[in-house]
Amino acid sequence: MLGLMQSQPLLISGLIEFAERHHGDAEIVSRRVEGDLHRYSYKDMGQRARRVAKALDGLKLAFSDRVATLAWNGYRHLELYYGVSGSGRVLHTINPRLHPDQIAWIANHAEDQVLCFDLSFLPLVQAVHARCPTIKHYIALCDADKLPADSGVPNLQSYESWIDAQNTGYTWPSFDENTASSMCYTSGTTGNPKAALYSHRSSTLHAYAAALPDVMCISARDSILPVVPMFHVNAWGIPYSAALTGAKLVFPGPALDGKSIYELIEAEKVTYAAGVPTVWQMLLTHMKPAGLKFSTLKRTVIGGSACPPAMIHAFREDYGVEVLHAWGMTEMSPLGTLCTLKNKHDALPEAEKMKIRLKQGRAIYGVDMKIVDANGEELPWDGKVFGDLHVKGPWIVREYFKGEGGDPLVDGWFPTGDVGTIDPDGYLQITDRSKDVIKSGGEWISSIEIENIAVAHPAVAMAACIGVAHPKWDERPIIAVVKKPGMEVTRDELLRFYEGKTAKWQIPDDVVFVDAIPLGATGKMLKTKLREMLKDYKLPQT
Ligand code: ADP
């Protein structure tokens, strides 16, 4: 017997329709490429998203055709989120930090038909358009009078004139909720990038879950600053969860330096911000010497890379901001776990609570996880044994776009490529990516743990731990360190700093001081590049 409740597909357009009707006056503020602040409401956004949908009809775009973006976080990008997906096309957000060759490769692979871009990326578009034969239309996200003359980009028009030509009389179409809504390519550190293809259903369920109190706790009382880019896994789904709850949205545009972010947080009374650790490092580096404090910021979700304990401490103790440590990946839309305490932890001493907060957190309803050994056997949740982390759930990939890479699942579970422990309370702790684990004398050393200790040293700005071949132990860890400007620490001082903080055999064999650690397009440390940089390095004789 079927239930007798109304059946309504979960569609992206449903989110904006709800937002317009129930909190149409909630604000959306954006720092524009032009430098000024733009503000309007969800109601305005909904109307302009409809114009986008009509304009796409005008280009004769078919259902499920791909519309690509190369854009910062801002209101026009948001309109594309809703206009493209809402009208049944697929939004393909491209990471502008990728190499032009990679951008051309993924635009061809996705068979993008339209490319919408912020003017900051005009040189990139000029560099790739000749290699992107599927793209028929180029839309510059600007006013008509800002459209560059003689750009050499074919079929180029300004976004404002493109959508101005449309009226807002548009009814969002209804279709199967399993239809693709957006796509995002993984950074492809090994081999060609592969695309996760999200659906209306998966994105809506993820948006619901992301807003839960034990997840991002997003509400109509929040003013949210997603520093995490809209070209990186849909800004962790915040553009959808914000429309669902009526939270104010504050977009930083291209201004991601510490000073600009701080000023925006204060001016727009931001209560909640989300981003990767490197961005927050820039913010803290700006605030500390100037003695600045936050007046409204309460929470920040940090993920994408392990958040160093020193950062969690600094936000909490120096600025009164709660850090919610999150773990996820492109293939997971992206949220998998988030760290919040349970009721039973209330009575724990502060130091014990902190130990829990440093972990990546508990699974969100919708995601199941397990750790397995080399034979695929599930390992116990004792917080000690670590294994390969596998996940499953309705917003986790079943297959990559165009079947790239074959069937990624193992017995219905997606192997994440991460290694971690799960404790009896269900808290996940990531120890490494499997390719970064250091295997020393038959034991595994967590590169994340070794890095976290180094960055707790006051003179260390950034640290990356890699394994180096060793005749006796197979591999030994060394740590590459970037010093904070004007600060000093010697190799021996830093190695002494490890004493008592980790087992003796896990202490790195050496410290290598470098000017910078190579970062990938999503702000993560690129250990493959670092290993290349240090290929002639020899371990000290002991
Ligand atoms: P990529 O395209 O590089 O895979 P993702 O953003 O999808 O980009 O990266 C996901 C990976 O980032 C995870 O598999 C994990 O290795 C790492 N990661 C994300 N969040 C965390 C975290 N909180 N702690 C440790 N590692 C993390």
Image (spheres, rainbow, N blue to C red):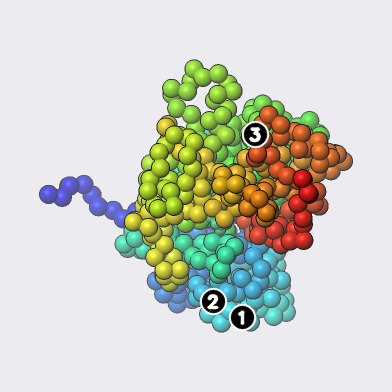
Q: Point out the tag, 3 or 2, that comes first from the N-terminus.
A: 2
Q: Residues within 10 Å of mark 2 (few under 14, many from 20)?
A: some
Q: Nearer the viewer, residue 140 or 235?
A: 235
Residue underneath mark 1: 131
Q: Is residue 132 above or below residue 320?
A: below
**Image quadrant containing the C terminus:** top right
Q: Position of residue 476 (x, y in %)?
A: 67, 48
Q: Position of residue 150 (x, y in %)?
A: 73, 79
Q: Is residue 136 left or right of residue 86?
A: right
For badge 2, the amino acid type reads Asn
Tell me the quarter of the picture where residue 487 sits: top right
Q: Residue at x 50, y 72 (%)?
A: 110
Whole-Å distance between the Cαs marked 1 and 3?
A: 51 Å
Q: Position of residue 501 (x, y in %)?
A: 67, 31
Q: Residue at x 57, y 34 (%)?
A: 358
Residue underneath mark 3: 502
Q: Residue furthest left?
A: 1
For badge 1, the amino acid type reads Arg
For badge 3, the amino acid type reads Thr
* Comparing labels 1 and 3, the label whose residue is closer to the camera: 3
Q: Residue at x 57, y 58 (%)?
A: 231
Whole-Å distance between the Cαs marked 3 and 2?
A: 48 Å
Residue underneath mark 2: 108
Q: Is residue 146 left or right of residue 160?
A: right
User: Would residue 325 be visible to someone looking at this image?
Assistant: yes
